[in-house]
Amino acid sequence: MILEDGSKLDVEQIELLNANGPYTMAVWKSGEVSIGNEEGLAGRSEYFLKKIRETILENYNLDELRKMSVLDIGCNDGWILHNLSDLPFKKMVGIEPREKNIEKGKLVRKILKLKNRVDYRVGDIESLKGEIYDIVLCCGVLYHVESIPTALRNIRQSCSKLIFIESRCLSSEHISESIKSEIEMRDLVYQFKDKICGLTAQKFESSYHDGSASKTTIVNVPSTETLIMNLELLGFDNIEVVADPETYRRDVWQDKRPLGGVCISAKISNTVKPIDESEVDWIINYEKQLEKQILPKDFIKPLFEYFSLKKETILSDELKAVKAQILDGSSIDLSFLPEVYQNKITYELINNFKYRPAQKIALEYGKLCHSQGNNSEALDVLKRITTELNADWRAAYRSNHILSKIYKDIGENELADKHKRLCLQANPKYPV
């Protein structure tokens, strides 16, 4: 058992290393000596260390790294940053909530006579107190925390350029069409983003093992999609799955374990907003598109007379089919409409008629009247909506918005202000 400098381990050192173990995260080496027993995780740390190094060097050259800092969150015994110490970072910091892990890292480096230029600290992400790092590493951490969104939000506050995540993960095979249907991805966000959803599995975890949660709690194992969604939410860009679960399982576990793992990198761009900051733009875009879309008179007027005025109205065969589909709540066939109306906004407007058809159809007819300069009829139609008890929320605030515009156009400024106020009272985010 000869170290790199030619010296040998003595019995006392061996006993001390055993007492400070287990060294299960990775293997420390010096000369002929290897300290560590990764048990069922053999090769994992070497694998994602390689991915980290490749990711860093693909994005930054050595001159750039000399001006940069790197932080390893949940650094355990410090093995990752130690093995990145050949890169010329200006500053290297590792934080770890368990003091024992920090101390056993110090011990193994001392006994193996390994040089150290990393600042290792006992603490968690909250202990950074506003410190900012160019690159943040988060490996083997997120599936040990109570809240992944909270953890990533805190990490985002300390990251200025690049994040690298390695995590156990839940298979995407569990994200079935039935689950997608059950959770109903119909929010405004999905008007502007792909219909992605994620899953998270919860389990109890004690603090018994050095690599587990810092206290007994319920932890979360995320799907890859969950991690990507959280990164997008926080404004990360260039999100790249460096190693997907299938690749990870094949390369690391050799398919001998059911564990899934994933490596993801992402960058921070000044041109990409966090999703919550994009919401205002989405609302403006969405509501303006709905307002601008005017349905054809020969389509909307007969439906208005039938549903809103309760008149016996002669309907074409196509409108009879639409009426039946509205009444039974089924998807409405719009293939008979001219091509100019074959778009997602028209589809959304008409397929929402099944929810409070009298008022939603009245709103569309009122919009038509207003667009044709028939303000008198538009006022009558839209006031039917706003003055009806238990009015449909969307139809009411959108009607109040148009009423405000009409009253402003005809010089009734007090009424214009009143309906603007009512619109914003119903929906403070409406783009008036």
Image (cartoon, rainbow, N blue to C red):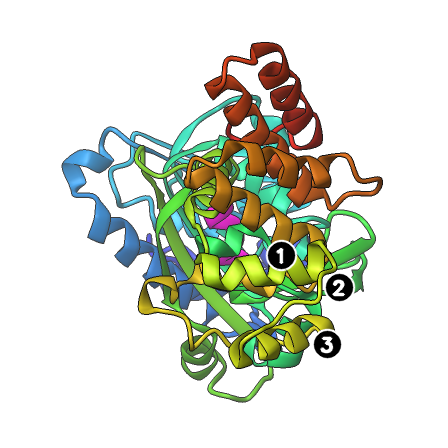
**The magenta stretch spans residue 142:** no
Q: Residue 283: x and y, percent?
A: 50, 39
Task: Select label 3 or label 1 by which is in front.
Answer: 1
Q: Residue 281: x and y, percent?
A: 43, 36
Give how far apart the Cα atoms at labels 3 and 2 are.
39 Å
Q: Amino acid at mark 2?
A: Gln
**Which segment is the magenta one?**
226-234
Q: Residue 90: x and y, percent?
A: 29, 29
Q: Amino acid at mark 1?
A: Phe
Q: Residue 360: x and y, percent?
A: 64, 52
Along the viewing direction, whichever of 117 and 337 lies nearer the viewer: 337
Q: Which residue is mark 3?
A: 328
Disc 2 residue crowd, few under 14, some 14–19, many 20+, Cα 10 Å = few
In the picture shown, does residue 40 fall above or below 114? below
Task: Select label 3 or label 2 by which is in front.
Answer: 3
In the picture shown, does residue 421 fall above or below 36? above
Give how far apart the Cα atoms at labels 2 and 1 are.
50 Å
Q: Which residue is mark 1?
A: 304
**The magenta stretch spans residue 229:** yes
- Is residue 329 rendered to the left or right of residue 78? right
Q: Which residue is mark 2?
A: 202
Along the viewing direction, whichever of 302 and 166 lies nearer the viewer: 302
Identified at 28% across, 49% down, the residue is 56
